Amino acid sequence: MDEAARGASALAAADFPLAITHYTKAIAINPQAVDYYIKRSIAYTRLSPAEPAVALKDTETAVLLANKRGKRELIAQSQLRRGIALFALERWADAKQCFDWVRKIDEKEKSLQIWGAKVQGKLDGLGDDDERRKPTVKEIPDIDLPKVAKPAPPPVAAPKVEAKSTIQGVQTPASHIRHEWYQTSDTIVVNLFAKGIPKETATIDIQQDSVSISFPLPTGSDFHFSLDPLYANIDITSSTSKIMATKAELTLKKVVPGLKWPSIEGTETSSDKTTVSTDDADESAAVKPAVPKIQASSSGPLYPTSSKSGPKNWDKVVETLKKKPKKAPKDGKDGDDSDSQQDDGIDSDEGDGVNGFFSKLYKDAGPDQKRAMMKSYQESNGTALSTDWNEVKRGTVETTPPEGMVAKKW
């Protein structure tokens, strides 16, 4: 809101000192505005006590400016306020003269009837030889117009020197760029962590069975990241991507909701296409994905184990035990020692009794019980084994290490 608007608000609220302050500032900005002088004269005449002499100066300036601009409406308003100020100064003949000039311009001015009756009553009470019965005011006052102050030339500003940013584009070294992923029942979310990826030049390609991201590096080379093929197909139309200040995020919609992906990538039938690379050989050698690729195996799933000989394929163990005949005891000894040393994936240091118990438990279990055993053993990292599928299928089986031990993620 400018000063004139503030002055009008103060005048409407009957805050006349504040109105005078704002209109004075407005006149300082635009000393040729007729309306500002008229409104300030109103505020001066309504002060308590009133200041009609100051108000008269404003009205005479307004009359002079209005005549210069040739605006009849402004001339009438200026002369009306001039007559009111003269009436307050007891110059009744001069006030009547101003009202007569207003009547020539606008006969329908409503306030003329009231002010005309007031001034006539005052004149009738004067003697014939009273000087106040004779008008001395001129239609156009002999005063000097306010001068418009010339604005001072703006100071010559020193030429701006734009500081060139020393950091442009990607701020994360290629060797430190990493990616992570997680999943919900309906989506796969892949995050590529790199600060300052340029949105204008970055390319994100989402296909039904693969995704890729590429963008230029400050070194002049390009950074490439791809997952090809994905573990399962995705819905391209519902998948989205966005680049933020510190990362690029891909939200991939699963074609089969509820399908749990054990890895982000699927089986690669040809050469290994994935992954992360740059156009510079030295940089690409140092860049590795944060989530290692899990190679699929035709020999069945491998489950977590603490065995010295490595992971155990329990399916193979079960099949072996099914085919292995029982040996009759001979001379108080159980079978041939050479056969008990190692039997198709069964570690000798684990003991035949343990293996026999688990193989029999697995063999005699139903389909749901087998699923519960596999899921609970795998998700708990070998710390829990359950045959209750109704309980296991509700969610991830938590790792519960033995008392006095702490589970650590590797």
Image (spheres, rainbow, N blue to C red):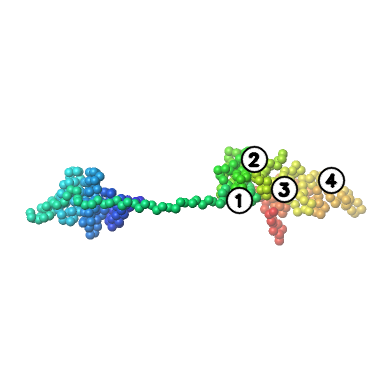
Disc on res. 374: 3
Mark 4 or mark 3, which has the lower sequence index? 4
Tell whether label 3 touches label 2 (CB within 8 Å).
no
Tag 3, which secondary structure? helix
Q: Considering depth in this image, is 7 or 262 the residue closer to the camera?
A: 7
Q: Which mark is residue 172?
A: 1
N-terminal of the two: label 2 or label 1? Answer: 1
Q: Are marks 4 and 3 in contact (CB under 8 Å)?
A: no
Q: List the residue tagged with mark 2.
A: 210
Three-letter residue code for mark 1? Thr
- The disc label shown at residue 324, or none: 4
Q: Is residue 386 visible?
A: no
**Whether residue 95 can be seen here:** yes
The answer to whether the residues at label 4 and label 1 have Cβ atoms under 8 Å apart is no
Residue shown at 16% from the left, 51% from the top: 137
Q: Which of disc 4 and disc 2 is earlier in sequence?
A: 2
Position of residue 256 measured from the top left corner of the image (x, y, whole percent): 63, 40
Query: Which residue occupies the foreground of this view, 322 or 38?
Result: 38
N-terminal label among 4 and 1: 1
- Distance of mark 4 from mark 1, alpha carbons? 58 Å
In the image, what residue type sits under mark 4?
Lys
Secondary structure under the numbered disc 4 in the rendered image: loop
Q: CA distance from mark 1 to mark 3?
A: 41 Å
Label 2: state its secondary structure: loop
Taking the spot 85% from the left edge, 51% from the top edge, the residue there is 341
* Count of numbered marks: 4
Residue sitting at 83 percent across and 48 percent down?
343
Residue neighbourhood size for the residue with mark 1, other residues' Cα within 10 Å, grouped as few (<14), some (14–19), many (≥20): some
Crowd around label 3: few <14 · some 14–19 · many ≥20 (10 Å) = some
